[in-house]
Structure formats: structure tokens, C-alpha cells
Image (cartoon, rainbow, N blue to C red):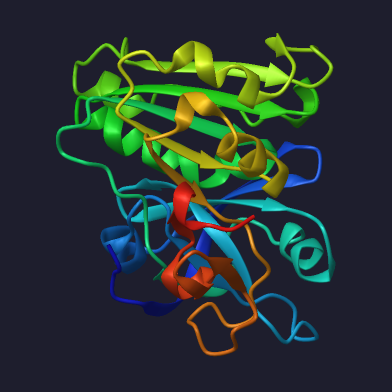
Amino acid sequence: MKSTMHQIKSKILSAIEAIKNVYLFKLHAPKIAKDAKPGQFVMVRCAKETILPRPFSIHSVDGSDISLLVNVVGKGTAWLAEKKKGDSLDIFGPLGNGFSVRPDSQNLLLVAGGMGIAPLRFLAESVAESGKTVTIINGAQNKDCLISVNAPQSLYDKGMHPANFQCLTATDDGSEGFKGFATQLIPHYLKNIQQVFACGPVAMYQTMSKMPELKGMDVQLSLEQKMACGVGVCYGCTIKTKSGLKQVCKDGPVFNMDEVIF
């Protein structure tokens, strides 16, 4: 599922603060938008004093445009959060392997933990448009940390009622939706599910890997890992798998759950 990589200067079409310290950027990037697959990412060059680019999952694709979610956690992302509509960014991608959806899978479960919703929205919109049923479990610490996900406008534009697009919320403190972790809802929504896709913190993956309800199922995880190059040169994002050491940027970021050693 790899695509041709493009290095471009992309114009910012919009930049809004989705929730506190998390910004949603819409970028004009025709070549990347054309080749991107759900689960892939781009690298963004930030401030001049920040030598290494930063990786961001492709949050959505709309024609010739892509969207990225930026969580402000350091110097590079703080610089990025200051950028405005009309500014340009140096980016390259799409990179990595995306999610693999089997043609015979009609019912999919997507599980997001915190910023894990970043790559899953693109996947949800893509499979919903193909007529598959999508259930999203969107988890966060509280309602102020939730990134909302709604049925894509494109479904309405095509005259389709998105009845096959369901989004559930779970918050640690119960301020919205189910009170508890997103993983606690998984067993209740596995009926008729053929594949499970997830993105979140390692603790969430560790819990999922021990769940008897997921044994034998096709579960794919998007791993969040610090990266330096994004193209498999520096080996800075190496992880342990049952088949040896793998690079998240090159061999992932999507891996089968049974393959990863947590």
C-alpha cells in the first residue's frame, strides 16, 4: 500500500484550533492527496532551528487537499501552531504503509485513543464511501479532549444517508458518552465485525492484545512513534516484532496486532 513520495511546498487553506492545543490544518497538496492511503503520514519541516521534520498522520483527504491534526507538544509543533491561512509549509509524503481493508469486509470497528483519531477519520470516510459499515469508538480523557468525527459530507452529496456510520464516545471521567476506557466498549460492538483498526497509546494496545474477544481477529494498529527521517534511514523508530526489528516509518506505521511485541 505504499505510494510515490512527493516533496512539495503546500499552502495552508485553513488553520483552526479544534480543541485546546490541537490544531486542524487544511493544506493544498494535490499530488499527496491523489496518492495517499488511509493510515499513511507526511513529514512537515518546522522552524529553522528545528532540524528534524515532524510526522503527522493524514487526517482526511478532500479532493486536492489534505488535513492534519497537530498536537502542540514541543518547539516544532508550537511553531507550526502559529502558522496562518495563506502561509506555506514544506512537506513530503505520503509515507509508510496504510491500513489494509479486505474486499470482503463489510463491517469495520475503529478504536481511537486520544490523538489516535488522527489517521482513523481518513479510514472511516474512505470505507463509508465504499458502502461498508463503520463503527468508531472515540476515547479521550474528557469531553474537552475529544476530536469530533461526523459522517462525511460526501455521503450526503452522493445522496446516501450515512446510517452505516456510527461514532461512540468514551471519556475517562464520564463527561461525555461512556464513562471509562474505549477498550471497555470493544467487546460490546464486535458482532458481525470482520476487521478492527486502532490508533492510540501503547497502554491501549497492551490491553487489546490481552482481550480474549479479539483473539483470532484481524486487528491492525497504527503505532505512534518518534521519528527523525520518516523514510527508514536513521532507524530511530525501530520496534520489536515477532519477525525481528521493524521500522515504524518504513514497515509501518500500521502493523498487525499479533505481530508486535509490547
Please provide percent x and percent y for residue 219: 42, 40
Please provide percent x and percent y for residue 82: 77, 60
Up-down relation of residue 173 to residue 16 (above or below): above
Image quarter hosting the C terminus: bottom right
Front residue of this view, candidates 48 and 212? 212
Q: Is residue 222 visible?
A: yes
Please provide percent x and percent y for residue 127: 28, 34
Q: Is residue 17 visible?
A: no
Q: Quadrant of residue 160?
A: top left
Front residue of this view, candidates 215 and 126? 215
Q: Looking at the image, which residue is at 52% across and 65% down?
A: 241
Q: Looking at the image, which residue is at 26% across and 60% down?
A: 34
Q: Looking at the image, which residue is at 42% across and 68% down?
A: 96
Up-down relation of residue 183 to residue 50 (above or below): above
Horizontal side of 93 relative to 33 (left or right) equals right
Up-down relation of residue 90 to residue 225 (above or below): below
Q: How many marks?
A: 0
Front residue of this view, candidates 53 and 181? 181
Q: Looking at the image, which residue is at 68% across and 83% down?
A: 52
Image quarter hosting the N terminus: bottom left
Q: Quadrant of residue 236?
A: bottom right
Q: Quadrant of residue 154?
A: top left
Front residue of this view, candidates 181 and 165? 181
- Outermost left residue: 104
Please provide percent x and percent y for residue 136: 48, 24
Up-down relation of residue 169 to residue 258 (above or below): above
